[in-house]
Image (cartoon, helix red, strand yellow):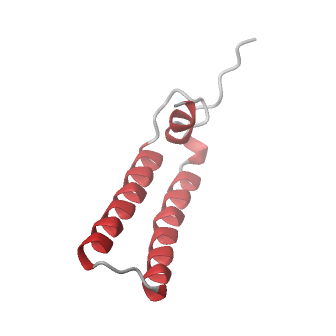
Amino acid sequence: MKWLQDSLTGKDNLTYDAARLIGVVGAAAYVLFWCAAVFNFGHFGPSDAAAYGAGLATVLLAMSGAVRLKESSEPGARSDG
């Protein structure tokens, strides 16, 4: 599960990043809520797909913006040499 640690930590791959963590949890919650809505209503049409895509894109764009804004304050990568 290295990919999960890499996606949740900063440049040094040791420090967990709050912006990334909240973004991943928010995107997962968004997917789960949509799954529950489809299960509850029983359909997923083209307009639903467009709304889903726009909403998920907004969540991921907000996550990437938060990561970019705090990029200068992240601890750098460790050098082992």
Looking at the image, residue 36 sits to the left or right of residue 7; the answer is left
Which residue corresponds to the image point at 60% horizontal and 45% vertical from the top-left?
72
Expressed as whole percent of the image width and height from the top left, the position of residue 17 reads 46, 40
Which residue corresponds to the image point at 48% horizontal and 71% vertical from the top-left?
58
Q: Is residue 26 above or below residue 74?
A: below
Residue 44 quadrant: bottom left
Of residues 15 and 42, which is closer to you in this image? 42
Q: Is residue 56 above or below residue 48?
A: above
Give the farthest residue toward the top.
81
Expressed as whole percent of the image width and height from the top left, the position of residue 3 reads 57, 36
Looking at the image, residue 32 sits to the left or right of residue 70; the answer is left
Image mark count:
0
Which residue corresponds to the image point at 54% horizontal and 65% vertical from the top-left?
61
Give the farthest residue toward the left.
40
Which residue corresponds to the image point at 44% horizontal and 54% vertical from the top-left?
23
Looking at the image, residue 24 sits to the left or right of residue 39; the answer is right
Of residues 40 and 25, which is closer to you in this image? 40
Q: Is residue 66 above or below residue 11?
A: below
Quadrant for the C terminus, please: top right
Residue 59 quadrant: bottom left
Expressed as whole percent of the image width and height from the top left, the position of residue 80 reads 70, 13
Looking at the image, residue 10 sits to the left or right of residue 38; the answer is right
Give the farthest residue toward the bottom.
47
Residue 27 quadrant: bottom left
